[in-house]
């Protein structure tokens, strides 16, 4: 049953493709000005903001691993 639900969900996602834009309207308006340094700054900011969730998830998995290792002993 669960497999059928996943297959239907993926099929619906595949059939309902639309154009997806990588930036919000404000970011796109700022970058379209033509200043290359500003575009690099926006991309660096996005990368900077993207790093923190990965660090937090990594720390969470580390503590879960350490807790499970302690339980096995």
Image (tube, rainbow, N blue to C red):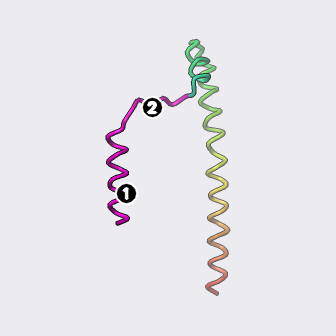
Would you say the magenta stretch is mainly helix, strand or loop? Answer: helix
* In-front residue for pair 72/1: 1
State the extent of the magenta-drawn residues as a range. 1-23
Residue 37 falls in image quadrant: top right
For disc 2, the neighbor class at 10 Å (few under 14, some 14 to 19, many from 20) is few
Q: Secondary structure at mark 1?
A: helix
Gap between marks 2 and 1 measured at Cα: 22 Å
Question: Where is mark 1, residue-wise?
Answer: 6
Q: Which mark is residue 41?
A: none
Question: Where is mark 2, residue-wise?
Answer: 20
Residue in the picture at 64% in, 66% down: 62
Give the left or right position of residue 11, taking residue 20 as reference.
Answer: left
Q: Secondary structure at mark 2?
A: loop
Residue in the picture at 48% in, 29% down: 21
Residue located farthest toward the bottom when viewing the structure as drawn: 73
x and y percent of residue 53 in the render?
A: 64, 49
For disc 1, the neighbor class at 10 Å (few under 14, some 14 to 19, many from 20) is few
Residue 58 falls in image quadrant: bottom right
The answer to if 35 sits in the magenta stretch is no
x and y percent of residue 3 in the render?
A: 34, 63
């Amino acid at each position: 049953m669960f497999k059928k639900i996943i297959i239907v969900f993926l099929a619906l996602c595949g059939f309902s493709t639309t154009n997806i834009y990588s930036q919000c309207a404000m970011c796109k308006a700022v970058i379209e000005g033509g200043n290359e340094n500003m575009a690099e700054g926006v991309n660096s900011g996005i990368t900077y903001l993207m790093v923190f969730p990965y660090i937090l998830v990594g720390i969470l998995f580390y503590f879960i691993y350490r807790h499970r290792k302690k339980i096995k002993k």
